[in-house]
Image (cartoon, rainbow, N blue to C red):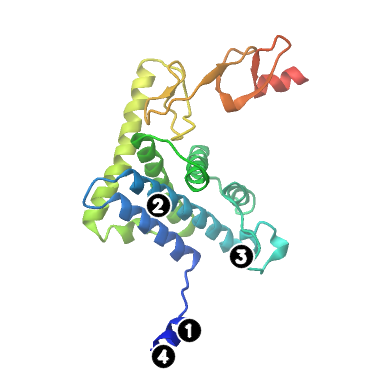
Amino acid sequence: MGNVGEKLMVEEISFSMIENAEDSLAHAIFHLTGEKSPTKKDFKRAILDTSHAVELLLKERLKVIHPAFVLEDIDKYPSKEASTVNVDLAIKRIKNICNLSIPEDMIKIVKRCRKIRNEIEHYEVNITKKEAEAVIGNMLSFIFDFAEKYLGLNLEKKFKKDEDMWEKLIVIHEFCEKHVRICEGKLFDKKILVDYCPYCGRQTFNVDSEKCEFCGHEEEMFECASCGGKYFMEEKSEKNEEGDPLCSECASKHGD
C-alpha cells in the first residue's frame, strides 16, 4: 500500500497550454453532444470551458513569440507565480507584438463570452437557450479558426474522429451560421436599421424593436440628443446643458 501511495505522490500531472485548451474544449463538446439534449447546466459548463480554451489559445500565440509575453508584467519572467495576461491584454499584444489582426466582430464575441463566464463564476447569470447556443456556436467557430490560422493546429480533424459527436456539434455551429444569414437577409430586405448585438456579437440587433433577431437578446437603447442616433446604454457618455443624453462621439465634440 505504501508503494502505491509513493507512486501517486511521484507521478506528475502535467498539461501544456495546448493540451489544457484541448481538454477544456473536449469538456465543452462532451456537455453539448450527449445522448440527451443539453440542459442549462450543460450550456453553463460549455460557456465556461470554451471561454477557458480561447484564453489559453490566445496565450499560446503570445508564447510562440516569447513566453514572457504571457505574463502581465514581462519583467517578472520566468516566475510562475506572476499573473498572466487577461483576454483584453492578450488580444492587444497579439495585435501589436504578433502583428496579427483578429476581426472586430470576433473580439466582441470573445469579450461577451468572458463577461457571461464572469457572471457564472462570481455572481448569477440569466440568458435564454438561444443566446447560449449563439455564444457557444460563435466561440467554437473562433476556436477552430484561430487554432488553425495562427497556431497551425487542426482541432477539427481531431474531434471529427468521433463522427457521431461531430455531427451533433456541427448542428450547433452550422445552425448558428445558417440562422444568422437568414436573420441578416430579413433585416436587409425590410431596410431595418441594425447594430451589433452586445450578446451574440452578430449584426442582427433590430434598433427599432431593441431586440436581436438572431439570439433574441433584448436591451434598452437611448437616442442621442445631438446626432439622433440610437446607442446602447453603456455607450451613454454624458448629458448636454438641457440634461439630455449624448453618445460618446457627440459628448467628445460637445466637450471641445
In the depicted structure, whether residue 83 falls above or below residue 36: below
Q: Earlier in the sequence, mark 2 or mark 1?
A: 1
How far apart are labels 4 and 1 at the CA level?
10 Å
Instruction: Say what amino acid the circle numbered 4 marks.
Output: Asn
* Residue 249 horizontal/vertical position (percent): 66, 23
Relative height, residue 95 to residue 132 (above, below): below
For the residues labelled 4 and 3, say whether their Cβ atoms are less than 8 Å apart.
Answer: no
Q: Secondary structure at mark 4?
A: helix
Residue at image point 61% right, 60% down: 70
What percent of the width, then of the height, locates residue 254? 73, 17
Badge 4: residue crowd in 10 Å (few <14, some 14–19, many ≥20): few
Query: For mark 4, what is the residue?
Result: 3
What amino acid type is highlighted by mark number 2?
Answer: Phe
Nearer to us: label 4 or label 3: 4
Q: Is residue 18 left or right of residue 235?
A: left
Q: Residues within 10 Å of mark 1 (few under 14, many from 20)?
A: few
- Quadrant where the C terminus is found in the figure: top right
3 or 2: tag closer to the N-terminus: 3
Residue 153 visible in the displayed image: no
Residue depicted at 55% across the width and 57% down the height: 59
Please tell me whether mark 1 sits on a helix, a strand or a loop: helix
Quadrant in the picture for the N terminus: bottom left
Q: Nearer the viewer, residue 144 or 245?
A: 245
Check disc 3 and report the residue beneath it: 67
Q: Which mark is residue 10?
A: 1
Can you name the residue that lies furthest to the top here?
242
Please tell me which residue lies in front, 120 or 164: 120
Residue 243 rendering spot, x and y as whole percentages: 69, 12
What residue does disc 2 label? 144
Query: Which structural element holds mark 3?
Result: helix
In primary-sequence order, the first of circles 1 and 3 is 1
Q: Amino acid at mark 3?
A: Pro
